[in-house]
């Protein structure tokens, strides 16, 4: 339990790690293990989110600040975050960084779920040969104090997808739980009813198209929108290395 570099007989006072710190460390470890952060994102923290690399967009600075403020203010302020931006801009990195800090600084139980994975697990639970039930998958998602739902809208919409997403978001909304969401789809309304097929096909898909207008509006009540702009971080770093 104690980290010390004191030798036997050394009268100097050894650096102490209190029982309390030690217990916090064990709790943080347990909460981190339970948060289901994928290995691909294990390296992500707020500290390792750089906003000074060549070509970084200024919106990343504001997004990093918003993430830090969120951690500071939680749980006095419980409004979640809706991180919106193109591929590779760092949305998942920032979302994981936030829950890591909440776990480490405040001992808050958090859960990470990829949207596609979650819907697939729920779908599989209808299969008789799979022992998990729909509720056994959904209960932790409903009850997580802070949930990250990564890549919202990444599955082609159907009535079932819309019903399931509204069930999840409405339950968390009613229970006043905090949700952090990432998405690639711009925060705009779904295509108007009367729009003809050609114009509909030519128009870029929006968050409204992917989750429905009612759920998009619900998200605005649950989350603060954080827009992240710029190029794919991996390409940015790669091209900076070639310079
Ligand atoms: N500002 C940053 N500082 C450090 N690493 C970053 C930054 N932005 C992104 N990365 C790293 O680049 C990779 C891609 O980032 P991430 O997966 O968070 O992007 P994303 O916006 O979620 O993309 P997608 O839309 O494809 O899900 C990750 O390994 C991440 O750690
Ligand atoms: Mg992502």
Image (spheres, helix red, strand yellow):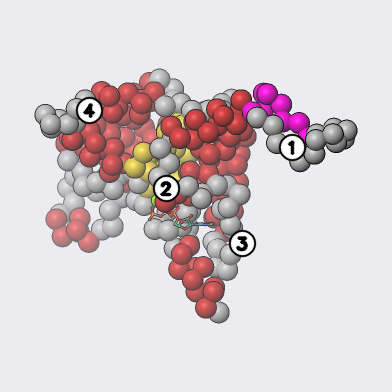
Describe the element under mark 1 as helix, strand or loop. loop
| Crowd rating for badge 2 (residues with CA inside 10 Å; few <14, some 14–19, many 20+) | few
Residue 142: in magenta span:
no
Question: Vertical placement of 82 versus 75: above or below?
Answer: below
Q: Range of the magenta residues?
A: 15-22
Describe the element under mark 3 as helix, strand or loop. loop
Describe the element under mark 4 as helix, strand or loop. loop
- Give the residue at x 22% y 28%: 132
Most extreme residue toward the right is 11
User: Is 154 displayed left or right of 144 in the figure?
Assistant: left
Most extreme residue toward the front is 8
| Crowd rating for badge 4 (residues with CA inside 10 Å; few <14, some 14–19, many 20+) | some
Mark positioned earlier in the residue sequence (1 or 4): 1
Q: Nearer the viewer, residue 225 or 142?
A: 142
- Give the residue at x 22% y 39%: 120
Between circles 2 and 1, the one closer to the viewer is 1
Q: Give how far across and how far down residue 226 sits, in percent.
A: 49, 46
Per the rendering, the mark at residue 39 is 2
Mark positioned earlier in the residue sequence (2 or 1): 1
Look at mark 3 in the image and give the residue it sits on. 52
Q: Give how far across and how far down residue 76 sits, in percent.
A: 59, 25
Look at mark 4 in the image and give the residue it sits on. 132
Total label count? 4
Q: Determine if residue 62 is in view.
A: no
Label 2 to label 4: alpha-carbon separation = 23 Å
Label 1 to label 4: alpha-carbon separation = 46 Å
> Where, by quadrant of the figure, is residue 23 drawn?
top right
Mark positioned earlier in the residue sequence (3 or 1): 1
Mark positioned earlier in the residue sequence (4 or 3): 3
Per the rendering, the mark at residue 4 is 1
Most extreme residue toward the left is 128
């Amino acid at each position: 339990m104690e980290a010390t570099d004191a030798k036997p007989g050394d009268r100097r006072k050894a650096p102490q790690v209190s029982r309390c710190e030690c217990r916090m460390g064990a709790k943080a470890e347990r909460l981190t293990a339970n948060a289901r952060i994928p290995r691909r994102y294990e390296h992500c923290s707020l500290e390792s989110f750089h906003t000074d690399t060549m070509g970084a967009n200024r919106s990343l600075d504001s997004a990093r600040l918003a993430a830090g403020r969120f951690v500071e203010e939680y749980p006095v302020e419980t409004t979640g975050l809706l991180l919106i931006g193109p591929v590779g801009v760092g949305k998942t990195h920032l979302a994981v960084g936030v829950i890591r800090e909440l776990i480490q600084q405040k001992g808050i139980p958090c859960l990470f779920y990829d949207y596609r994975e979650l819907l697939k697990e729920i779908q599989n639970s209808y299969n008789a040969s799979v022992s998990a039930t729909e509720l056994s998958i959904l209960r932790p998602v409903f009850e997580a104090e802070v949930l990250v739902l990564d890549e919202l809208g990444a599955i082609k919409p159907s009535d079932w997808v819309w019903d399931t997403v509204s069930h999840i978001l409405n339950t968390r909304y009613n229970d006043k739980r905090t949700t952090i969401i990432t998405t690639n789809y711009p925060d705009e309304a779904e295509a108007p009813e009367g729009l003809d097929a050609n114009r509909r096909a030519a128009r870029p898909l929006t968050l409204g198209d992917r989750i429905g207008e009612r759920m998009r509006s619900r998200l605005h009540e649950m989350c603060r929108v954080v827009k992240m702009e710029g190029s794919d971080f991996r390409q940015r770093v790669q091209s900076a290395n070639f310079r």
